Every structure is written in structure tokens, then in C-alpha cells.
């Protein structure tokens, strides 16, 4: 089961050859996908040889396959993690009973909605990032961008497979619509807000892979705990790919921070910008913006949908099966800070209704783990400046805090104070212009843009100077 049929027109480990109807349907979708990729995928470089990894098996080490590939020839396919024997439903009212191998009628709409919402983010991010190749800070970074892009394309395949295989006509229609929406389009935008934001500079790309892909990690983690076994297996394999995207975000931001610190020390006035770098306060603003945008993606703090998804077993908590002993989450409360009579007060929310917030808090913990590593790097660079992540109430556009104004520490403030300070907290037009002005391509193997440190090591044990992308 673990080996992948790479020679098939659609590489897969789901025995597609023995399901002719499904195979035909997906082979019909394939040219539409390629059209979309050619139209909306990375601008330029489609004829370049890119040093990419391709999955050849879903077992450990199945990733070790690196080679030069032209992106349109990437072997996009359908790979599910191996089935767990005797797997039981991890969460909710039916926890402990056998998982589903088909979609139960009563959960069909909810499951379809969950899958489509996840699926929509995959092509959206490719669209958002499509112009970045032209301004890469190094060939190493350009290769990482393209690796992320082709894998987001594969994630779309993973979700479209579920739609085609388990949702009949509706699923096929949804699969078509996934290629019709466009990130940032006024008439046919992508479903979630963060996936309509422009991503035109590399600092944004690194924040996106750090924070927004990390949201993906937690959403996929919740779906990996689903009672619907094909969804669980699909998401488990996607998580192994996602780990690299997060690596790109974390380590690249650290390289920008280190460089900012070094240039700050070099400058007689301690001004990294005067030395052509990105100063740490500017990086802080980008962190504030993308952290806040990304935690919105978890949904409202108090949510009856979240309660229903948990109750019916469609989603679980992060590592539900592994880390929790009690899987029903009944007769328990979550203490949530809410605004009452103009003040922050703690409210008891039934735990199931707070599942979005439970997942968000796991995410926030994970993000703080990375923050600590960054601050250690700044300590190593011997500068006193430290970075932070804003409170989860700051700059929210969704959920119970959205109607109010908070500072980055989470204190309730007036709208006037907020408006007076917002330019200190979030990127201003001038900041964006400055960062944009640094985005000049560096295409020589081993060379780095002045505003970023080289990586500690190359990809797949290749040297940093390796020619990760060969121009066409
Ligand atoms: Fe993805
Ligand atoms: Fe990703």
C-alpha cells in the first residue's frame, strides 16, 4: 500500500487503476488543473529545472527523492497515509467505535464544506505567491518557494480526490469551482480572508509560511482526527509535506532577523535600514500582522459549528487520540475572556463550543516555541532587541474580540488610542514601500540578498552554493 504508482497518468497509492469511473473523472479534471497551474502558478521559471523533492512512498524516508524537475512536469498525485488497523473514532459522541469508510448521509454537507474550505486555501496560496520568483533573495529561497507551491498544488489534488471519490456530482462541481475562484478577486475571491491578501514581498512570504501554513498544520491535525477515515489518512500525509513549509517560514525569518541585527550593529546609528537591511521593529510589524490574520482562521471563539463537528466526530482536537484520555468533552467548561459592559470578564463556555479556541491556543503555544528560538538567535547576535507575538485579542477581524480595540498586549483601549498607535504596530504604507524596495533578485548560486543571512545548510545535504534553480 505504501508504494506509489508513479508511472500512472495520475500518480497514486489509492489503486486508481481499479476504479475506472473515478480514474476517468480525475483524468478529466487533470488538464483543467494544469491550465490553472500554467495560468496562475509561478510567473516565469516554468521551463526552469528546479531541484525538487517528490514523494515516491508514504513511508518514512519516502521523501528522499530529489531531482531537477520542470514544475509543470511535477508528479502531482494522490497519496494517502497508510490505513491504521482497527482505527476507532477519536472524538465526540461515538468515540471508540469503528471509523467510517464512507460518508454518512447526515454528515455529508458538513464534511463537504470542511473539505472545500481546506481545499480552497491550497490553490489560493499558490496564486498569492505567484510573482515572488522574480525577486528571490537567492536560488536556495527560490527553490523553497517553488517546492511549497508544487506541494500546495498537490494538497489541492488530495482534497479533490476526496470530493470526486466520496461526494458524487456535488463533489465534481466543487472541484471545478476550486479552479475558478481566485485569490484577491473582487467577484470570485477565495473563501477565507487571509487567502485573499497580497503576498508580494519575501518578508510576507516567510510570515505566511510561518503563520498561515502553521494554521494549516493545526487544521489538518484536527482533520487527521476525523471519524471519516479517508480524510484522516489524506491529512496525515499532507502534514508530512507541511512540515517543510513551516521550516521555510521559521528558518527564513530567523535569517532575516539575524541579518537585521548584524546590520544594526554595523551602523554607527544602529539603523539597519541605513545599511540596506530590514530592521527588527519592521519585522515585528510583519509578525503582528500575519500572526493576527492567521489566528482569525481558526474561527470564532464560541461556535456551535465547532461543537457539532466535535460531537459528530468530524474533527478532533490536536493529537486527540494520542494526548487525550477523555474524548467526549461533555459537562466541561472553557474559561474565555470576553467583553462585558466595556470590560474584560471571564465567561464559562461549554468546552465543545470552545473547540476553535482550544485549537487556536495549541497553535499559539507552537508559535511561541518558535519565537523563543528567534529571540535566542538575537541573543547570539548580541543585540538587546527582542521580538514578541501579539495577544490573540489584537487586530482581530473575526470572533468575539473583533468589534473592540486592543493593544498588542491585549489591553482594551479606545478607538482613538488604537488609531493613533496603529502605525507603530502594523506595517504602514511607507514600511511596505521600503521592504518592496529591497526586493531585487539575486540569481547567482550561493549569493544572498543583503537583507538576509545564508541558511545554515543547503537542501538534501547539498551545499548552499548549489544551483537550486537552473534558468531555462
Ligand atoms: Fe497545503
Ligand atoms: Fe503549506
Image (tube, rainbow, N blue to C red):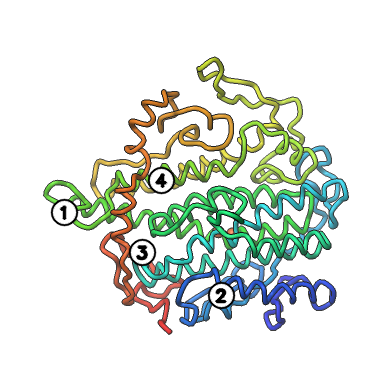
Disc number for residue 266: 1
Residues at marks 2 and 3 touching, judged by CB atoms closer than 8 Å: no
Front label number (1 vs 3): 1
Q: Do callouts 1 and 4 mark residues in contact (Cβ within 8 Å)?
A: no
Ligand 2: quadrant of the figure: bottom right
Q: Which residue is mark 2?
A: 38
> Against 297, is 242 above or below?
below
Q: In the image, 289: left or right of 382?
A: right
Q: Secondary structure at mark 3?
A: loop
Quadrant of the image for the N terminus?
bottom right
Q: Residue furthest front?
A: 187
Residue underneath mark 4: 287
Above or below residue 315? Residue 14 is below
On the image, the x and y values in percent for residue 282 come to 31, 46
Mark 3: few/some/many CA within 10 Å (<14, 14-19, 20+): some
CA distance for labels 1 and 4: 24 Å
| Total numbered circles | 4
Whichever of labels 2 and 3 marks the residue nearer the N terminus, that label is 2
Point 35% across, 69% down: residue: 138
Q: Where residue 110 appears, x then y in whole percent?
A: 77, 47
Q: Residue at x 65, y 31 (%)?
A: 302
Q: Which residue is mark 3?
A: 455
Q: Position of residue 378 (x, y in %)?
A: 30, 47
Q: Horizontal and vertical percent for residue 281?
A: 30, 43
Q: Mark 4 and mark 3: span between their CA atoms?
A: 20 Å
Query: In front here: 328 or 304?
Result: 304
Label 2: few (<14), some (14–19) or many (≥20) C-alpha neighbours in 10 Å: some
Quarter of the image for residue 256 reads bottom left
First in sequence, mark 4 or 3: give its number. Answer: 4
| Residue at (46% x, 34% y) in the render | 394
Q: Residue at x 35, y 44 (%)?
A: 284
Mark on residue 231? none
Amino acid at each position: 500500500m505504501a508504494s506509489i504508482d508513479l508511472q500512472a497518468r495520475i500518480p497514486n497509492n489509492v489503486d486508481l487503476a481499479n476504479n475506472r469511473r473515478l480514474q476517468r473523472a480525475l483524468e478529466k479534471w487533470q488538464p483543467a488543473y494544469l491550465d490553472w497551474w500554467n495560468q496562475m502558478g509561478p510567473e516565469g521559471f516554468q521551463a526552469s529545472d528546479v531541484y525538487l523533492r517528490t514523494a515516491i512512498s508514504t513511508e518514512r524516508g519516502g521523501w528522499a527523492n530529489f531531482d531537477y524537475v520542470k514544475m509543470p512536469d511535477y508528479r502531482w498525485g494522490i497519496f494517502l497515509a497508510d490505513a491504521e488497523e482497527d482505527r476507532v473514532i477519536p472524538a465526540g459522541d461515538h468515540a471508540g467505535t469503528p471509523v467510517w469508510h464512507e460518508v454518512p448521509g447526515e454528515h455529508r454537507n458538513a464534511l463537504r464544506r470542511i473539505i472545500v474550505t481546506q481545499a480552497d486555501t491550497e490553490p489560493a496560496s499558490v496564486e498569492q505567491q505567484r510573482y515572488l520568483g522574480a525577486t528571490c533573495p537567492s536560488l536556495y529561497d527560490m527553490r523553497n518557494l517553488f517546492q511549497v507551491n508544487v506541494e500546495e498544488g498537490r494538497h489541492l489534488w488530495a482534497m479533490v480526490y476526496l470530493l470526486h471519490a466520496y461526494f458524487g456530482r456535488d463533489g465534481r462541481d466543487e472541484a471545478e469551482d476550486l479552479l475558478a475562484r481566485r485569490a484577491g478577486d473582487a467577484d470570485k475571491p477565495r473563501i477565507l480572508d487571509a487567502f485573499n491578501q497580497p503576498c508580494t514581498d519575501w518578508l510576507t512570504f516567510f510570515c505566511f509560511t510561518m503563520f498561515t501554513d502553521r494554521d494549516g498544520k493545526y487544521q489538518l491535525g484536527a482533520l487527521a482526527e476525523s471519524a471519516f477515515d479517508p480524510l484522516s489518512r489524506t491529512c496525515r500525509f499532507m502534514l508530512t509535506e507541511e512540515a517543510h513549509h513551516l521550516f521555510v517560514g521559521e528558518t527564513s525569518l530567523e535569517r532575516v532577523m539575524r541579518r537585521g541585527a548584524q546590520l544594526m550593529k554595523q551602523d554607527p546609528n544602529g539603523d539597519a535600514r541605513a545599511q540596506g537591511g530590514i530592521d527588527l521593529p519592521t519585522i515585528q510589524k510583519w509578525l503582528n500582522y500575519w500572526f493576527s490574520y492567521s489566528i482569525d482562521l481558526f474561527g470564532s471563539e464560541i461556535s456551535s459549528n465547532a461543537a457539532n463537528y466535535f460531537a459528530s466526530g468530524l474533527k478532533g482536537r490536536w493529537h486527540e487520540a494520542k494526548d487525550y484520555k477523555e474524548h467526549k468533552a461533555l459537562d466541561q467548561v472553557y474559561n474565555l475572556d470576553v467583553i462585558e459592559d466595556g470590560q474584560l470578564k471571564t465567561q464559562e463556555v461549554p468546552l465543545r463550543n470552545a473547540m476553535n479556541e482550544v485549537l487556536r491556543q495549541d497553535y499559539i503555544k507552537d508559535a511561541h516555541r518558535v519565537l523563543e528560538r528567534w529571540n535566542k538567535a538575537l541573543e547570539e547576535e548580541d543585540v538587546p532587541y527582542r521580538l514578541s507575538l501579539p495577544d490573540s485579542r489584537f487586530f482581530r477581524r473575526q470572533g468575539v474580540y473583533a468589534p473592540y480595540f486592543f493593544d498588542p498586549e491585549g489591553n482594551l483601549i479606545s478607538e482613538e488610542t488604537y488609531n493613533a498607535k496603529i502605525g507603530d504596530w502594523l506595517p504602514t504604507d511607507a514600511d511596505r514601500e521600503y521592504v518592496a524596495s529591497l526586493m531585487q533578485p539575486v540569481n547567482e548560486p550561493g549569493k544572498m540578498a543583503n537583507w538576509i543571512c545564508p541558511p545554515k545548510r543547503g537542501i538534501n545535504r547539498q551545499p548552499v552554493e548549489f544551483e537550486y534553480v537552473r534558468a531555462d
